[in-house]
Image (spheres, helix red, strand yellow):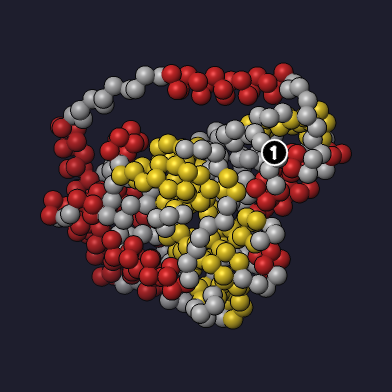
Amino acid sequence: MSGRWDRGRVAALAPDAASAKAAEGVARPAKWGGTGCDDEAVWGECQGSGKSVYRTCADLAGPAFRCTCPSRKIPCKHVIGLLLLWSDGSVASGARPGWAAEWVEQRRERAERAQERKPAPAAKARDPKTAERRERRVEDGLAELDQWLRDQVAHGLAQAEKAPYGLWDEAARRLVDAQAGALAGQVRALAAIPRQPGWPDRLLEEYALLRLLVRAYRRRDELPAGLRDTVRSRVGFTVPQDDVLRDGERVRDRWCVTGSRDTAQDQLTTRRVWLRGRETGLPALVLSFAAPGAALDASLVVGTEVDADLAFYPGAQPLRALVAERHGPAVPAAPAGTSIAGFLDEHAAALANDPWLDRWPATLDGVRLAQGDGLHVVDEAGDALPVRMADPWRLLAVSGGGPVAFAGEWTPDGLRPLAAWQDDEGAVLL
């Protein structure tokens, strides 16, 4: 590595704002012993509560992180705190202790073996009878869902407002049995729609989108190829990563990492990382998954930009992608955003291609936080978007009331903030 990272780049590694705040309390030399660094790694031992001592190490090339603390967040507050000390120059160069050297070398060996590994042979052709049986099960499951949706509307939505989660969980369970897992997740999520004014309208809208998906799947052979891929994906048919890397549309650009969010469900943690192409302006979503105790991919750091080829999954509105090839290290950078009107036009075009989109990345330039009928971000033209955030003070402190670049996820509930960029602070997680 050449040079130490600035504090903004370190803070951008945090999986959420709470972790970034907790790391500040850990970034004190008195809490650490055995710290050191070289061109490739930073390490140290942090005094935890009681007699616990946590061994912490960061591989700067990945970056990748290791800590013996019980936190499921990656990187944890100890890793970020150690890197903040290193960024400030409070960690001196030295020789790696055995535990740190062993971990870093194991990572290097695994990477070398992966490079030397011969290309995998072509995947065996899928058994057409197995595929046919699944198609029949999915069709039967969707026919049952269609009847269930009609029953919900026929009986009225008033009783659904006080219904237990079991109303939707049972319907979702039947879809899981029918091997329509993605659709089951959409049905299960209906129970979480906020019970607030306009709730019946929102529920009816979701029911309508589900029925549209059912009807689209029945007519899948009549659909354009991209839309057919989208419908199959929304139902639960997956595309292997090898197929995406081999056949997916590739786009090379300088991709700015604009936001990241982790969600946990059913013993699986999912990390959503949003990117935006510097030249193409294209949005992209990179997903990674981890079982409890396993590490999520941390190679895409909010507030950095990487020259890379992305391979996009097939669909009418390509969004999800894999990093197929990098052409250099990541460098700190702020994204090029749009006005609110420009964003809404972009989102409308995406919805025309994929009406089942439940979130879309927003990267806005020159917006301020405003309080009116709830929190909003407002641009120079006076256009506004509602913002859903529990604690606005971090954004207010960063912006000082002035305009900032802002990234978030646009959802049916409003704009959920991810990060902001300020000239002096750089990238700040929200």
Q: Residues within 10 Å of mark 1 (few under 14, many from 20)?
A: few
Secondary element type, mark 1: loop
Count of marks, rendered view: 1
Query: Can residue 144 be seen by looking at this rendering?
Result: no
Which amino acid, mark 1? Gly
Where is mark 1, residue-wise?
A: 3
Q: Answer with left or right where residue 8 lies relative to residue 26.
A: left
Using the rendered view, name the quadrant where residue 206 is placed: bottom left
The image quarter in which residue 193 lies: bottom left
- In the rendered view, would you say 305 is above or below 336? above
Residue 7: horizontal and vertical position, in percent? 71, 48
Q: Give residue 320's position: percent from left, percent from top.
A: 38, 48
Residue at (37%, 74%) from the top-left corner?
A: 201
Query: Among all residues in the image, which is located at the extreme left?
Result: 222
Image location of residue 387, percent across then percent down = 54, 69
Could you say which is closer to the camera, residue 173 or residue 341?
341
Left of 320 or right of it: where is 81?
right
User: Eyeballing the image, is 61 above or below 138?
Assistant: above
